[in-house]
Image (spheres, rainbow, N blue to C red):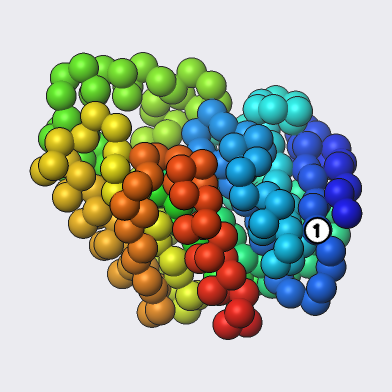
């Protein structure tokens, strides 16, 4: 069963799609990376919808969603997602799955609404100290390309503000957590790859109950390179509910 909708929230309409049957299990909510929209999950949506109902959506200004005049920071995006869930009558509990910058948003969501979340899967999620600790270890070319990419939704400053919001909001979560780290990142030296995996491992500290999985054959889009790694992480959390 697939149900597409345009949901009116404060300031704009957001496109959302519900896929799968209502089997009494928590709804799986997917949030894509920076500048990406719901299509980023095409490789796993069918398998995930066998486990439970799945909600994919486009953040404001991306895909089929209208633009919003609100700042493009994590805190605002979390408010918009919360409003979308209320307006679309998608009740908690949720299992949250965030890729890259979407992981920043869903960590914030889990912090703000901890009692509505029964599992969190972070798919090669951006660590909050990325700029200070990781970026300086990369080549000048990489750093320049990284800094120039912020043209699709939030600008560079808004993205960095989002990472700061995540730092400021950080507290221990009583939510089962799966951290998936891409083990074969493009353009990463052996040292950079090792640091990346270490920083992903450190994200486990936000939860009382976390597990790291290194997707050895995946670049940044684990859901495309090894979709089964993402699906099995979600299944693991659903089975525990």
Q: In the figure, residue 141 lies in which quadrant?
A: top left
Position of residue 12 measured from the top left corner of the image (x, y, whole percent): 77, 32
- What is the total number of numbered labels drawn onto the structure image? 1
Q: In which quarter of the image is the N terminus?
A: bottom right
Q: Image check: 48 left or right of 6? A: left
Q: Residue at x 73, y 63 (%)?
A: 50
Q: In the figure, residue 36 lies in which quadrant?
A: top right
Tag 1, which secondary structure? loop
Q: In this view, does 80 lie above or below 93?
A: above
Q: Quadrant of the C terminus?
A: bottom right
Q: Which residue is drawn at 58% across and 82% down?
A: 240
Q: In the figure, residue 24 lies in which quadrant?
A: bottom right
Q: In this view, does 86 lie above or below 114?
A: above
- Does residue 185 appear anywhere in the picture? yes
Q: In this view, does 2 lie above or below 147?
A: below
Q: Which residue is drawn at 68% across and 50% down?
A: 45
Position of residue 47 measured from the top left corner of the image (x, y, whole percent): 67, 57
Q: Image check: 232 left or right of 28? A: left
Instruction: List the residue tagged with mark 1.
Output: 20
Q: Mark 1: few, some, or many residues within 10 Å (few <14, many ≥20)?
A: many
- Does residue 126 appear anywhere in the picture? no
Depth order, front residue of 235/172: 235
Q: Which residue is drawn at 74% across and 30% down?
A: 65
Residue positioned most to the bottom: 240
Depth order, front residue of 12/201: 201
Q: In this view, does 212 lie above or below 153?
A: below
Position of residue 9 measured from the top left corner of the image (x, y, whole percent): 79, 42
Position of residue 49 measured from the top left corner of the image (x, y, whole percent): 73, 58
């Amino acid at each position: 069963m697939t149900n597409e909708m345009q949901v009116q929230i404060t300031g704009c309409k957001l496109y959302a799609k519900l896929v799968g049957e209502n089997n009494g299990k928590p709804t799986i909510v997917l949030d894509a990376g920076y500048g990406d929209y719901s299509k980023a999950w095409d490789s796993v949506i069918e398998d995930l919808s066998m486990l439970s109902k799945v909600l994919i959506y486009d953040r404001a200004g991306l895909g089929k969603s209208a633009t919003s005049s609100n700042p493009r920071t994590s805190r605002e995006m979390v408010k918009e997602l919360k409003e979308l869930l209320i307006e679309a009558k998608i009740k908690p509990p949720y299992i949250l799955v965030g890729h890259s910058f979407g992981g920043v948003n869903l960590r914030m969501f889990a912090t703000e609404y901890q009692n509505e979340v029964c599992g969190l899967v972070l798919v090669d999620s951006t660590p909050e100290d990325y700029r200070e600790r990781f970026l300086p270890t990369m080549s000048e070319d990489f750093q320049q390309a990284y800094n120039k990419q912020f043209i699709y939704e939030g600008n560079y400053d808004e993205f960095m503000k989002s990472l700061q919001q995540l730092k400021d909001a950080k507290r221990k979560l009583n939510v089962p957590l799966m951290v998936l780290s891409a083990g074969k990142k493009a353009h990463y030296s052996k040292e950079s790859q090792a640091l990346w995996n270490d920083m992903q491992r450190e994200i486990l500290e936000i939860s009382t109950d976390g597990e790291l999985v290194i997707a050895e054959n995946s670049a940044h889009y684990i859901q495309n390179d090894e979709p089964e790694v993402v699906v099995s992480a979600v299944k693991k959390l659903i089975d525990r509910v």
